[in-house]
Image: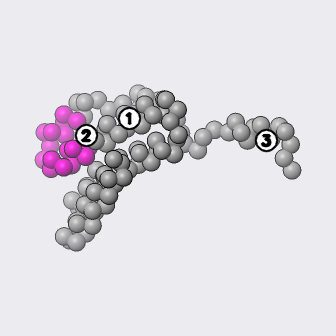
């Protein structure tokens, strides 16, 4: 049975995500600049830059108390674009490559 003490402590429980300090998430523009010197495609470079902007936006949303589910979904869909493009590059066939690129496209539309 629930008593008044346990109900109050249940309401004060921590959120299901781990809070990360700004210093841990901050990605400097030098990281984006170093990507320009590599042999990655333009699309991969843009996806990485977008992921960096998405992470910074996520930090701002969390600080401004935006609903956590919305901020987390934005973070997941915004950062998965580059991950799926990377998977597409390592695909075994054209069909697998095309499937991963389509997934990246859908994630980009979801993030919009």
Which residue was labeled with disc 3?
7
Q: Residue at x 33, y 47 (%)?
A: 112
Q: Secondary structure at mark 2?
A: helix
Residue 47: image location, x then y, percent: 25, 46
Along the horizontal axis of the image, is 20 left or right of 7? left
Q: Quadrant of residue 53?
A: top left
Residue 28: image location, x then y, percent: 29, 29
- In the figure, 110 relative to 5: above or below? below
Which residue was labeled with disc 1?
57
Q: Is residue 111 magenta?
A: no
Q: Nearer the viewer, mark 2 or mark 1?
A: 1
Along the horizontal axis of the image, is 54 left or right of 72? left
Q: Secondary structure at mark 1?
A: helix
Q: CA distance from mark 2 to mark 1?
A: 12 Å
Label 2 packing within 10 angstroms: few (<14), some (14-19), many (20+): some
Disc marking residue 22: none
Q: Which circle's residue, 3 or 1, is located before the other in the chain?
A: 3
Give the extent of the magenta segment. 32-48
Marks 3/1 in contact by CB < 8 Å: the verdict is no
Q: Is residue 38 magenta?
A: yes
Q: Which circle's residue, 2 or 1, is located before the other in the chain?
A: 2
Q: Main secondary structure of the magenta part?
A: helix
The one of 44 and 34 positioned closer to us in this rendering: 44
Which residue was labeled with disc 2?
49
Res 84 seen here:
no
Count how many numbered circles sit on residues in the image: 3
Q: Which circle's residue, 3 or 2, is located before the other in the chain?
A: 3
- In the figure, 12 relative to 78: above or below? above
- In the figure, 86 relative to 29: above or below? below
Marks 3/2 in contact by CB < 8 Å: the verdict is no
The one of 12 and 23 positioned closer to us in this rendering: 12
């Amino acid at each position: 049975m629930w008593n008044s003490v346990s109900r109050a402590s249940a309401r004060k429980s921590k959120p299901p995500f781990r809070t990360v300090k700004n210093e841990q998430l901050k990605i400097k523009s030098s990281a984006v600049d170093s990507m320009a010197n590599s042999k990655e495609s333009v699309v991969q470079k843009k996806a990485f830059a977008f992921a960096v902007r998405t992470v910074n936006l996520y930090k701002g949303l969390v600080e401004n108390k935006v609903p956590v589910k919305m901020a987390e979904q934005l973070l997941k869909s915004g950062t998965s674009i580059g991950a799926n493009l990377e998977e597409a590059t390592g695909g075994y066939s054209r069909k697998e490559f095309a499937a991963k690129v389509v997934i990246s496209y859908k994630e980009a539309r979801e993030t919009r």
